[in-house]
Amino acid sequence: MRQITLSTKDYPTEAKALIHLQEHVLRINSSKVFRAHIVPTLGLAIDRFVKEEQIEEIVKTKPGEAAIEGLAFTTATGYRYFFNKHIRPKWGNTPLEELKPLAVTEWLKSLPLAPKTRGHIRGLLHLLLERAMLWGLMDVQRNPIELVVVKGVSRRQKRPYPLTPAQFQQLIAKLDDPCRTIVITAMCTGLRISEILALRIESIDLSNSVMLVRQGVVHGRVGKVKTEASQDEVPLDSAFVAVLKAWMGDRTEGLLFPSPKTGLCYHAAPLQQKYLLPAGKELGIPRLGFHAFRHAYRALLDETGAPIGVQQKLMRHANVATTMNIYGSSTIAAKRNANSKVVQMVLTAA
């Protein structure tokens, strides 16, 4: 018989000691032997998930540090928040086999959160039970969380404001650089603000009028773009190339929009609060945020008559409806033609 000694210094609470003990017993014995002596709880699954995905290590990374391979910083911080704020307090001590769909459904309904947020929590619970089955903490079976339905997840809570080319011209007339050029970049490419703030001059080929999007930044942490489809070449219209040349000057490397204070990436939220929202308010544009330009870009692509397949590629969406996918891939020439129509509309508006 093996003995395990746990220090109160390392495990000050009974709950933490029990979770650590469960991990040791599971490693020493087979999953069936383990489960015959200790009933695995959701708390055990959470702790093992946090450890394997290096969530604490990712969350502790500082702006400018190399990203840890694995989950994105925002994903890791979101998971940790949901674990600590909602899931662990309610279900941490619940045996995995006793997690019932109806109880979870009623609990999710009771949370004073937006449907999309409740959907995220439901998805995280589903992932935890999938991992629990993989680790042998519970029998392989139909995941009970599949029976949990969160209504209204896909329903938009606030409709995006339809920014017009004329309003865009009025807006950039009120903005100073770097926000002005950042906004022009957003409107002329459809890029997410996280991608724009992480753009590097080395990724921009002005001679061939293309830009390679391959990284994003959130809360100062540079990492991968949102999806695999997001990493792609973006065509640059000649009018927008002129804007980039004027902004870049003689610079040939480094961030396209470096913070003059730190030399690192800007944070999107302060830019939005300090510049976009006040300018939008003056023009009667409510809740103006950077994502409004991505919505506007997509709407203007519709006005140009661009095929859905071309729009998908320009927006760099990972998934579209089947009816959209049948249009197939788009050539750089087709993308350039559609993109140029949007740029000409917004940069030459009266």
Image: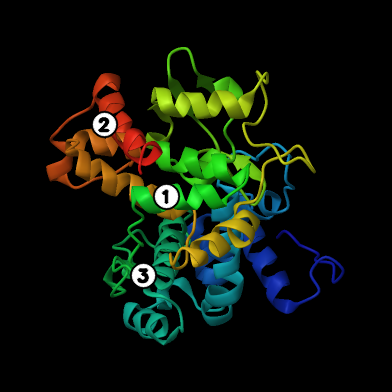
Residue 22 vs 295, above or below: the answer is: below
Of residues 260 and 114, which is closer to you in this image?
260
Residue at image point 65% right, 45% down: 221
Q: Between residue 178 and residue 262, name the one nearer to us.
A: 178
Quarter where residue 148 is shown:
bottom left
**What is the three-letter code of the residue carrying label 3?**
Lys
Where residue 146 sits: x, y (%)?
A: 29, 66
Location of residue 267 in the rendering, given as x and y in whole percent from the top left corner: 65, 50
Q: Earlier in the sequence, mark 2 or mark 1?
A: 1
- Residue for badge 3: 158
Residue 218: numbered disc? none
- Residue lying at the far top in this picture: please name it: 207
> Of discs 1 and 3, which sits in the foreground?
1
Residue, disc 1? 168
Q: How does the figure colour the protein chain or chains? A: rainbow
Amino acid carrying label 2: it is Ala
